[in-house]
Amino acid sequence: MSDSNEREHLDAKDEHNREQRIEGIKRWVECIESEPPETWGPQQNAVVNDQLDAAQGIQTSASHQQHVKDVAAEILEVSDTSDADSK
């Protein structure tokens, strides 16, 4: 396979992966719009916790781990505020 063909193959693979991620996001949005937070909240927490565990498993820097925790906390804060506003 020439470099040009390989690049085209990788670009096509990247586009396919991107489309799959977007479809997954759309399915998740449908889920959180149609289900109460008590249903999807624990699932989301499990994903975030697994990501944190995986990050610790590959020995990321302490500053990166803190950044991930800070982002997760911000997401929870926005979610909690949104939940309170909708009541």
Image (cartoon, helix red, strand yellow):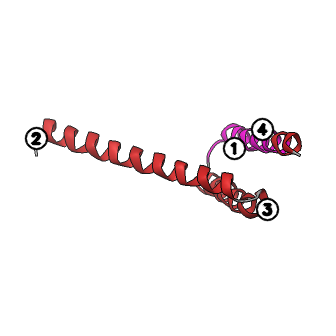
Q: Position of residue 48 (x, y in %)?
A: 68, 54
Span colored in magenta: 60-80
Is the residue marked by circle 1 packed among few (<14), some (14-19), or many (20+) residues within 10 Å? some
Q: Nearer the viewer, mark 2 or mark 3?
A: 3
Depth check: give the residue in front, 79 or 2: 79
Considering only order in the chain, which callout, 4 or 2, is on the residue closer to the N terminus? Answer: 2
Which residue is under mark 3?
A: 38
Q: Is residue 59 left or right of residue 1?
A: right
Q: Position of residue 37 (x, y in %)?
A: 77, 57
Which residue is under mark 1?
A: 65
Label 2, label 3: how many angstroms apart (C-alpha)?
52 Å
Depth check: give the residue in front, 77 or 31: 31
Considering only order in the chain, which callout, 3 or 2, is on the residue closer to the N terminus? Answer: 2
Considering only order in the chain, which callout, 1 or 3, is on the residue closer to the N terminus? Answer: 3
Label 1, label 2: how many angstroms apart (C-alpha)?
40 Å
Q: Which mark identifies residue 33? A: none
Q: Main secondary structure of the magenta part?
A: helix
Amino acid type at mark 4: Glu
Which residue is under mark 4?
A: 74
Which residue is under mark 2?
A: 2
